[in-house]
Every structure is written in C-alpha cells, then in structure tokens.
Image (spheres, grey):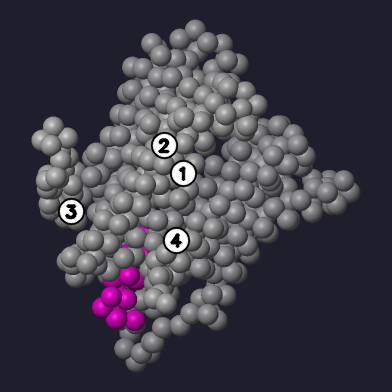
Amino acid sequence: MKSRPNLLNFFYLLGSGLAIHFMGTVYRIWLARKIGADGLGVFQMAYPVYRLLSGLATIGLPMAITKWVAEYLEKKEFNKINQLKIWSVKTVIITSLISSILLFLSAPLLGKYVFADPRVKFSLLIICIAIPFSALSAIYRSYFQGFSLMAPTALSEITEQISEITTACLLLMFLFPVIKLESSAIPMIGLTVGEIVCFLTVYYFNKYKHSIPINTSNIENIPRLAIFNYAWPLLLNQIVVSISAASEASLVPKLLISNGYTLSQSTNIFGVLNGMAAPVAFFPLIFMLPLASVLSPQVSSAAQTNLSSVFQKKIQRYYLAAICICLTGFFLIFWNARPLALFLYGNVSSVDLIRLLVIGLPFAGIAILNLTILSAAGSSSIILMLSLWGIGLKTMLFFILIKPLGINGAAWSITVTQIFIFLASFAKISSIFQLDAKIHPRLPQLFRFPTVLL
C-alpha cells in the first residue's frame, strides 16, 4: 500500500485536537462546579497573562524554525538544521527566563493594581515556572513540523492535557481539603505540570526517537539576522492580536451600554456572543488547523523548487478539502443552529448570533490556508499588515454597527472582517505566486466563475 504521510499527519493532529477539545470542555465544566465562578474568574484573569508571556518568550521563532528546517531538509543541509535547533533552544531559554523573572517581580503589582484581586498574585507566581517549558516545547514542536513529523506534536498535546487535568483533579479532591491553598491557584498548578510533561514528551522524541546525519567537523552558519527579520512581524502580530482581543472584551460591552443596555445586560450579551455563539459557529476550524500545519513545511520546501506543477496540484487539493470542510460545516450549523443551541446551552439566546457568525466560517477557513502559505513562503510582514488592517476594520465596524443593530452589529463586524481577511490574503497570494485565473469553460456565460490554478 502506498504511504500517505500527509493524511497520517492530518489525522494525528485532528485526533489530538478533538481529544483535547473534549477533555478540556469536560474539565472546564467540572472545574467551574468545584472552585466556583469566583475561582474560575481569577484563573481567567491570570491565564491571558501566561499565554501572552509564553508567546513572547518564543520571540516568534516557532514558525521560522518550521520554515528553515523544511528548506534545509529539501537541500539536505543537515548541519544547518542542527545548528538552527541548538541556537533556537539557547535563545529561547534566555528569553523565557527573562519573561519569568519579570513576571515574578511584577506579580504583586499586577495583582494589586491591574486585576484588583490579590489572589491573582499567587497564580501569576506559579505560572512563572511554566513559561520556560511552554516556550521550549513550542521550539521542539516546530522543529519536528519542519520534518513533517506531527506525531510528537499530537502526543505532547495529549500528554499535556491529561497531566494538567489529572494534577488539578487530584489536588482538588484529595489535597485541597487539608492544605491552605487558594482554590483558584490549583488550575495553574495543573497547567504548570502539564507544560513540564509536554516538554519532556517532545524532548524524549528529540533525544531518543529522532536523529539526522551530522558532520561535527563542519559547523555551518545559519542566517540569524534573516530569521529575526522573519520572526519579529510574527511576534508583533501575536502581541497585537492579544491586545485586540482584550480590548474587544472591554469595547463591545461599553458600546452596548452607550446604546441603552445596563452593565449586567451588556456583559451577559457579550458572553453569549463570545462564549456561546462563537465556539459553535467556528467549531469546524478545528479541522483546518491540522490541515494548515501539514501544508506549512511543504510550502517552505517547495519554495526552493519554484512551486512545481505537481506541488501546485497538491495545493489545489488542500483548498478543495478546506472548501468541502467549511461549506459542510456552514450548512450544518446554519440550518441546525436552534437544536444545537438547545442541546448545548438549554436555551435559544445564541441562535441568531450563531447564524450571523457562521456566514464567515468558509472565509475564515480558507484564510487560514492563505495565511499559512504566506508565512511558509517568507511573507511574515504581510501577515502583520493584514492583522492590523483587519483589527482596524473590525473596530470601526463596531462603532458603526453596534448602535443600530446591538450585539448583532458586533457579529456582523466579525463576519465582515473574516471576509476582508480572506479577500486580502488571497490577493496577496495571487500577486506573489502569479496565480493564473481561468474561466470555467463548460458553464453558460451567466454562471461561469474563475477557477484559480496554483
């Protein structure tokens, strides 16, 4: 039987993603009942700080590593691959330790003045330990993805989730009653243990399961400056997106209040949009992320051979798969929004918002592939530019549409932004790769449509 590594890699990531999604949902429900809304709120205050700092600690290197490893592998420059890994690990050890120390020193001030809850301080102190392990895990995962090896990523994600949940459950059920510890800190302890186990998993793969031929007498130089030039827009993009998400959580409720809603109503309605409607509308994207991860190293490798016709046909298949996934998800969710809302939430308050958001699902799914291709081809600055334009457009639409349409205006703003990102990213790909658009020849003139050949 012919080997299908791409399909196998896709199912590795898809299987781990679905398993993690299921375990995470059950865990969050159990956690909310065990530590209460108050403890969960403290956890939600500290968690975004952790995600931001663990991302900053990688300084945008993970996607750069995948790109350069794939390129060096195509040219069989194994010494450079090894040097890239060693240099990246050393760099991220330094940056992650700096991030952890800064958080350790600033945790009391953040807990007192930013979050206005002293309990956040202890949670922040705990995650100082997790940041270096999280950042190093990201480096090793990206290294393996450059080889199109997705099993280490999939297995490390599962071991991380199992360790996190098991640790938190054991602490809450057996140790919490006998030790003096804030219940809100226990999920952070579980998260830290999960990150340590995740790192140990990928490190095991690196040390015992993976090897490449190395000529120790010939030490290769890697283009550090070029890697940094590629990585910094991705790092800045991550910062901008994180800040935008935090600002959105403040802006939309304020606009609703200025439109006549009470504080309680605005908070509740925004929760319906982000906490109930969005997870349902964009659930099929869980299939797109593995597809993009499998495609990324192949684009980087193919860039060295000027995108041969064979590879162009392969990209067409990726786009066809993405279109089928997203359109199937759109029709199923749009026409079954009411029964889905009743089954998941026991009410229909999110139905209209689900239908508005899911309109953007096909565009968001294709945009993920577009951005993956741009990143793998080295156009990281374009991704940053598209994010800035998208955030600016969405913010402007919030101010324009929320006043006449209420929370539906916020949903329309998100949907229109998804469409914009799709169109803009596709235009950039077309200009970079000089795509050839042909008119479908077998349909009547009125129904002909452009078929893009990569």
Mark 2 or mark 1, which has the lower sequence index? 1
Say if 262 sits above or below 116 in the image. above
Residue 1 on the magenta segment: no
Residue beneath the point at 51% across and 29% down:
337
The boundaries of the magenta stretch are 60-78
Amino acid beneath label 3? Leu
Query: The N terminus is located in which quarter?
Result: bottom left
Which mark, residue 10?
A: 4
Mark 3 or mark 2, which has the lower sequence index? 2
Whether residue 165 sits left or right of residue 221 in the image: it is right
C-alpha distance separating marks 3 and 4:
24 Å
Residue underneath mark 1: 284
Which mark, residue 453?
A: 3
Mark 2 or mark 4, which has the lower sequence index? 4
C-alpha distance separating marks 3 and 2:
25 Å
Q: Is residue 436 visible?
A: yes
Residue 63 on the magenta segment: yes
